[in-house]
Image (cartoon, helix red, strand yellow):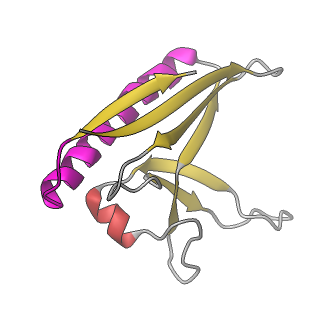
Amino acid sequence: MSQYQVTRRYTLQANNLYRMQVWVSEMTENMPCKIFAWQSLEPFLGDPKSPEIFVHVCSYFDLIAIPEDTPLQEEPIRLYRKYFFDIESRDKALLERTWRKVKTQVLHLVQDLVRLNTQEPVEVGFVEV
């Protein structure tokens, strides 16, 4: 059985914010590692850099429709995919709820990929470091 693994790390930063980092740490053939959708927002006044935010775990359709690494500039909602995301919060319980949702969505995505690509089952592991 093939293995697909997602890893999470918590850190408490100097500003008393909890930071949760999540990334695909192991994958198998025919399974994408860039499964986290990000959005590039329009730059704010005076800031030349576009802010980027994590949006959601991709669906099967998202893997086809959303490009990797760089958004299509002509799109009104500029989405792209990465293999990781990180979020910050003062509320660790909120991050824990988010982690549970991410795990559920990753499991559904992997199950969809296995079923739609008619490949052997994949064992999904979740690791905390």
* Horizontal arrangement in the rendering, residue 79 relative to residue 112 (left or right): right
Quadrant of the snapshot with the N terminus:
top left
* Horizontal arrangement in the rendering, residue 13 relative to residue 36 (left or right): right
The structure residue drawn at horizontal position 47% and vertical position 71%, both measured from the top left corner, is 67
The outermost residue toward the front is 1
Q: State the image coordinates of residue 28 (x, y, percent, origin top left).
A: 36, 49
Q: State the image coordinates of residue 116 (x, y, percent, origin top left).
A: 15, 59
Asked if the magenta segment contains residue 29, the reply would be no
Q: Nearer the viewer, residue 95 or 30?
A: 30
The outermost residue toward the right is 46
Q: Main secondary structure of the magenta part?
A: helix
The structure residue drawn at horizontal position 62% and vertical position 63%, both measured from the top left corner, is 41
Asked if the magenta segment contains residue 120, the reply would be yes
Q: Nearer the viewer, residue 125 or 62?
A: 125
* Horizontal arrangement in the rendering, residue 125 relative to residue 81 (left or right): left
The outermost residue toward the bottom is 74
The tally of labels here is 0
Q: Is residue 73 above or below residue 10?
A: below
Q: Is residue 84 above or below residue 46?
A: above
* Horizontal arrangement in the rendering, residue 73 relative to residue 1 (left or right): right
The structure residue drawn at horizontal position 24% and vertical position 42%, both measured from the top left corner, is 108
Q: Quadrant of residue 74?
A: bottom right
Q: Which residues are magenta?
A: 92-121
The structure residue drawn at horizontal position 51% and vertical position 64%, both measured from the top left corner, is 80
Quadrant of the snapshot with the C terminus:
top right
Q: State the image coordinates of residue 109 (x, y, percent, origin top left).
A: 28, 47
